[in-house]
Image (cartoon, rainbow, N blue to C red):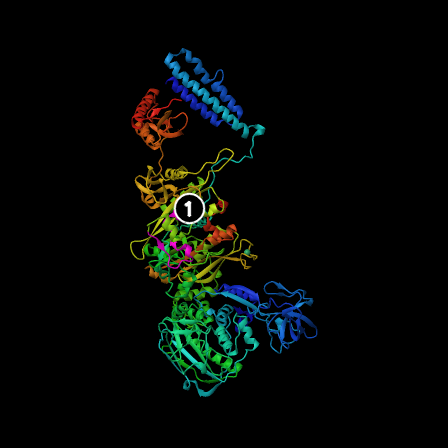
Amino acid sequence: MISYKWLKELTGLDWSPQEMAERLTLCGTACEYIDKADRYMDRVVVGKVTALKPVEGAAKIQLATVDLGGDGMDVICGAPNVAVGQKVPVALEGAKLAGDMVIKKVKIRGVESAAMICSERELGISDDHSGIMVLEADAVLGTPLAEQLQYDDYILTFELTPNRGDSMSAIGVARDLAALGGTEVRRPSFELKEVSAKASDSIKVSIDDPEGCPRYAARLIRNVKIGPSPWWLKRKLLTSGVRPISNVVDITNLVMLETGHPLHAFDLDRFGSREVVVRRAADGEEFVTLDGERHELVPDVLLITNGKVGVAAGGIMGGLDSEIEDTTTDILLEAAYFDPAVIRKGRKHLGLVTESSSRFERGADPNGIPYAIDRAAHLMQELCGGEVLKGIVDCYPGAIEPKEITLRPSRCNSVLGTSIAVSRMKEILQGLEFTVTGDDPMKVTVPTFRPDIEREIDLIEEVARIEGYDNIPDAVANIGPLYTPLGRLDRFKADARHILTGSGFDEIVNHGLVHQNQSSLVNPGQPQVKLTNPASEELNTMRNSLVTTTLNVISHNLAHRNLDLCLFELGKVYFPGGGPGQWVEKERLVLAVTGHSPHTWRSRPRPYDFYDVSGAVDHLARHFNWSGLTYRPHRFSAFEGDLSFQMTVDNIEMGFLGKVSAKISEAFEIKQPVYLAEVELEPLLAAEEVRKEYRPLPVYPAAPRDLALVVDQSVKAGDLVEVVKESAGDLAESVEIFDLYTGKQIDKGKKSIAISINYRSDEGSLSSEQVDQMQKALVSRLKKNFNAQIRDK
Amino acid sequence: MSLTDDVARLRQEAFDEIGRADSPERLNQIQIKYLGRKGAVTAVLKGLKDLALDERKKVGAAANRVRAELEEQIKETLGKLSVAAAGDAFDYTLPGTAPRLGAIHIVNQVIDEACLIFQRMGFAIERGPDIETDYYNFEALNFPPDHPARDMQDTMFVEGNGVLRTHTTPVQARVLETQKPPIKAITPGLCFRNEAISTRSHVAFHQVDGFLVDEGVTMGDLKGALVAFCKAFFGEKVAIRFRPSFFPFTEPSAEVDVSCFLCDGKGCQVCKQTGWLEILGCGMIHPAVLEKAGHDPEKYTGYAFGIGMERPAMLKYRINDIRLFFNNDVRFLKQFC
Ligand SMILES: [Zn+2]
């Protein structure tokens, strides 16, 4: 959050808030919201509490008389901090405050009130709702509050990318604006007056870990008077979303918001020594941060110490024991530079994200320290009456130098597809405060506030984003390969989806995360892939069967009274692999039915069963030319023992089909039969692809014959069909089962199966004698093999 | 041909005709043709007297059976035709009788639509594992260890140092290692994030990433391709803007916004009054990514992009709860038949 006025002050640009937001967004600093700072201050004026009296029968509220600079009025007030003499914001009738509150006339316990004394939260100033806001003593009665507070401003809220630490400051954002607007950033200038006593005589600084903390600078400021900050300072903090605390702390926060460099102020008297030692924390070392939390440290945390014990978790948060208090007089002001990766590890260990850590983590400017510390010291001198001791005690063992990067203008244009002039590139880079020498190539010195710029391509991006992506012409021609065939898995999936939805199945999609108990139940003894940090305990394992997720989906639907389901999914299952860091992922297809077929005016519902699943598999088999699809009984633990089958295609084991066992159904709270098939795709897709091929249409007539057989119940229709095909050979063009009957006219333990055979030869018309002969041979075979009786109608 | 064969053929023909009869009048004609006084079956029966005894018995039984069957079939069919099909009584408001139609899952429909557009531009489809290594998910894509960029993607891990891929860009890294430019591919698939499940976020989502590496690929090529995609996918009318952003594996990087097609860019709740919808991220492949895969970034350049598919699906179909995708409630699924 940055105030529009502040950016205007730093750039001198007279763009409207909307224009500023738009141009920043289009150069990479995305502005999410533009809010009017005074949007909740309409009809709110400055008033003074002149009297307070209790309201009869209401302990928590009082009646305050407020003077609005002429008019006076009585206002009911429930705030604990209200007092006579205070100047306060008074919202009049019709005022629209934060939280959709509109001020209306109210009557409480017989007392009428048509206004309200507001908290900061109600005015949209901060989220403080502990009491009413108390204004400066010199506030002018009756003045509109926005005017009194100088809140005729806009607040721009940015969404920052993690590479741009420099954008976490007003000056950083102003720098992009200046480059866009062809102007320069107007940094606050000041003259720091130091007293003659040297800081280095009173404090020593040493760094044990110069990699974690390459630079540590300190200043001493004596005889400060702690108190509230002036309004202009508070306003800058509030409009940046930071709570004012006291002048010294507010100054360190202001300089951080302004320059992007986090500072820390210690109470020198409570510091515990006159030396600063920066080191890694010892394993198990204890430290209490200023939020009162006790931490057990690890060496990942950089600790600022007084030579003995920790006084701050470097770059993350100060310690409770050396915090600034109302009685503090002498200040040790710290401006340090910490390594981003070290801060990241440290704050992860502490479980803290602070204004300071997020800036250091993205990269602060090691060479911006003198400006930042002097600016803060100067303000402490101006606003807190402090005396600044001479000199910065600066420990900077290995100076971090600006990088020098070569930019070839031709490369820039060839990567972007542009023809930007060399002079324009130079202008852009200089506008961003880079130093440029030469033309082609140019040598670019990258200031240390831009650690994200590492190589030529990064400079090319700088040119592109300031020039504007809109100014890169869109290519109109297609480049690269013009055609690449689709792989077999993708072709399979696309076709299977259409075939199965055409067959009435709905496609489901799962993310494959389940609970381990579900997986163990459905697929007992099978290895599982477990998550180490699941988003939710319910989803701590990756499925090793599509059955698990399908049953979850069925369960969900049944719970919502969707009782008739035909579902399929094309998805992956996961197993641990042969070694560490290895996993096996398999593509599978699951088909499931439960409930009843539709009840229409032409058809009665019937329960879905085995054949509804096998029928869909047949559709696929037909389309994909899977020949020799067979089922054989095979015990799978997920299925009922007598309804559990393995599917094979040309001896490739392609999966299983069956009725989900009662035990598993119950565990998934499924109270109706579920039939389900899971198909392993890899072996099918690895087999040689059988292409469809044209066969000439028949020229000779067919001789259709029907045959009704009575056989034992145990005889399988598929076996009968096999024998028919074998017996008739190529002359049986098709063999279909067209009736199945058990009942009155058939002996117990027997069934009647009717088969229609279409005889046809492609060499000539079959005579009825020929067909009769074949039928005869067939019948005798069926009698012999199956003890079949021929049934005459 | 024997007489029984003739009877069998007559039966077949008659049944075919009955099956194709579209009115009671037509059925009446069929009845006359086969069973009338001069009908074909009647003729067979009349001719029985000329046959030998056992032949007479056999053919007679067959013909009588056929007559009975045909009479029954005609009666039944007549019943149905008079309810549904005859003259004034024909009820055209009865529902048709095609088998029930299933629905392709809406998220797959949207993914297919996106993939098809890119396929027409010549992109291949490449796939990779859902369980990735840190190397392919991060390091090969120029995410330094302990860099805040890693926080952009809250990651779930599996036992054995596996990473549930947070994007499908790791497939790009894998393909770059094994193929030589020109390479032009999209990488659709499932991705995971360690996020709380709510109306707006989920532990998993689908992404379509894509990339092109060749000599002389420019950012203008990237813009041209994505403008073409957005117009094909969101409609010819949408405006498209590219704005600078940050991804570790691209430089320069961009976010692509399309003008809000819900309010025509005027500003509404969905686009947070901005008139723009953030749709995808893209950029020129970072030279470090090409280097890691063994390609010379001076010789080759490339672009890459990534689109999360649930969001455009939600926008296009006004779906207001991301959990609906993985709930698989058939009342939801069937809305997109
Ligand atoms: Zn909109």
Expressed as whole percent of the image width and height from the top left, the position of residue A250 reads 51, 76
Is residue A28 placed above or below B192 in the rendered structure?
below
Q: Which residue is mark 1?
A: A666
Residue A766: % across, % down: 34, 23
Q: How many marks?
A: 1
Ligand 1 sits in which quadrant?
Answer: bottom right
> Left or right of A106: which side holds A313?
left
Q: Nearer the viewer, residue A271 or A721?
A: A271
Screen quadrant of the C terminus of chain A: top left
> What is the residue that sits farthest to the front in this orientation?
A57
Q: Which residue extends farthest bottom?
A: A196
Q: Nearer the viewer, residue A504 or A156?
A: A504
Q: Position of residue B233 (x, y in %)?
A: 48, 51
Q: Which SS class for mark 1?
A: helix
Question: Which chain is disc 1 placed on?
Answer: A
Q: In the rendered structure, which segment of residues is drawn in magenta?
A: A527-550
Evaluate whether residue A549 shows in this view: yes
Which one is in front, A370 or A440? A370
